[in-house]
Amino acid sequence: MGGYLIYFIILLIVPIWANMKVKSTYKKYSKVSSDSGLTGAEVARDILDRNGLQNVAVEPFRGMLSDHYDPRSKTVRLSESNYYGHSIAGAAVAAHEVGHAIQDKEGYAPLRIRHALVPVANIGSNFSFILILAGMLMQAANLFFLGIIFMAAAVIFQIVTLPVEFNASSRAMEQIAATGMIRSDEQKGARKVLNAAALTYVAAALVALLELLRFVLMFVGMNNSDE
């Protein structure tokens, strides 16, 4: 009973806590203007140019915390508040997304692996539960096992995402510190924003791994009951 309680606490509470943490931290530092006065767009453009990535565009994008790097179009897209704003949070997020662009340029191995896993991970996310449920209802071990395989692919994607995100944040801090875009006394706030964002990926990977483990144990139990 205690084990199931811990499992459900992690499954339900951890993602909610991580999401609240990133939103509260971002909200706090999005209200603090950086001393440089640079917008997120200017931060991104400057770092890109310094790293020989003049071909990468920087565009505004609708939505809160919708910032991302699109490797297909070679575009850094920043949420409008970060694109036009002058905050410490905006500078940190912009530098983080540029970190992904630098990874792409350098052929960073975990990023390449993550890109290769995207189609498989999408299939796994969409069909794993369907196959597992069908396997349970029909007592079909083969369907259940196939669902676990698909789920495992999605979990691997989540795990590979971790070094990609942590590395991009590390690159971001190096860039904004070295160029003076963020003063030394502002770096703590920028780091807090990036660390809070990283927590959401850690939480997602942990939950996905626990879900996979639960279904693996159920599959083993199903097979044992058939013997």
Image (cartoon, rainbow, N blue to C red):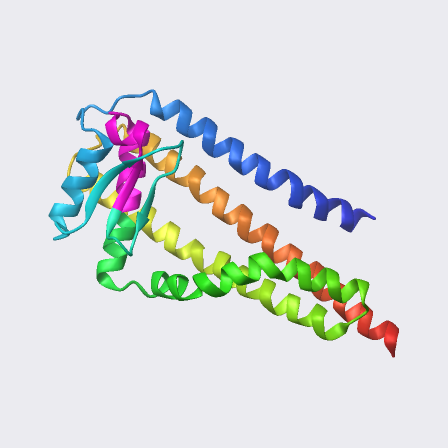
- Please, is residue 88 above or below residue 59 in the view? above
x 18%, y 28%: residue: 38
Q: Which residue is depicted at the point 44% across and 44% down? A: 198
Along the viewing direction, whichever of 182 and 40 lies nearer the viewer: 40
Is residue 184 visible in the rendered image? The answer is no
Q: Is residue 197 left or right of residue 38?
A: right
From where the camera sits, is residue 162 visible? Answer: yes
Query: Does residue 90 sit above or below 8 in this rendering?
Result: above
State whether residue 39 is above or below residue 195. Answer: above
For image coordinates 40% across by 56% down, the residue present is 163
The answer to which quarter of the image holds residue 127 is bottom right
Percent x, y of residue 192: 39, 34
Question: From the image, which quarter does the C terminus lie in?
Answer: bottom right
Count of all numbered marks drawn on residues in the image: 0
Give the image location of residue 86, x and y in percent.
Answer: 24, 25
> Is 84 within the magenta?
yes
Q: Which residue lies at the image location 26% right of the left edge and 64% below the top edge?
A: 107
Residue 135 x, y percent position in the rendering: 75, 67
Asked where in the image residue 132 lies, by quadrant, the reply is: bottom right
Q: Position of residue 45 (x, y in %)?
A: 16, 40
**Residue interval drawn in magenta:** 76-98
To which quarter of the image does residue 211 belong?
Answer: bottom right
Q: Main secondary structure of the magenta part?
A: helix
- Left or right, residue 195 beside residue 91: right
Q: Nearer the viewer, residue 190 or 44?
A: 44
Q: Is residue 217 left or right of residue 92?
A: right
Q: Is residue 99 magenta?
A: no
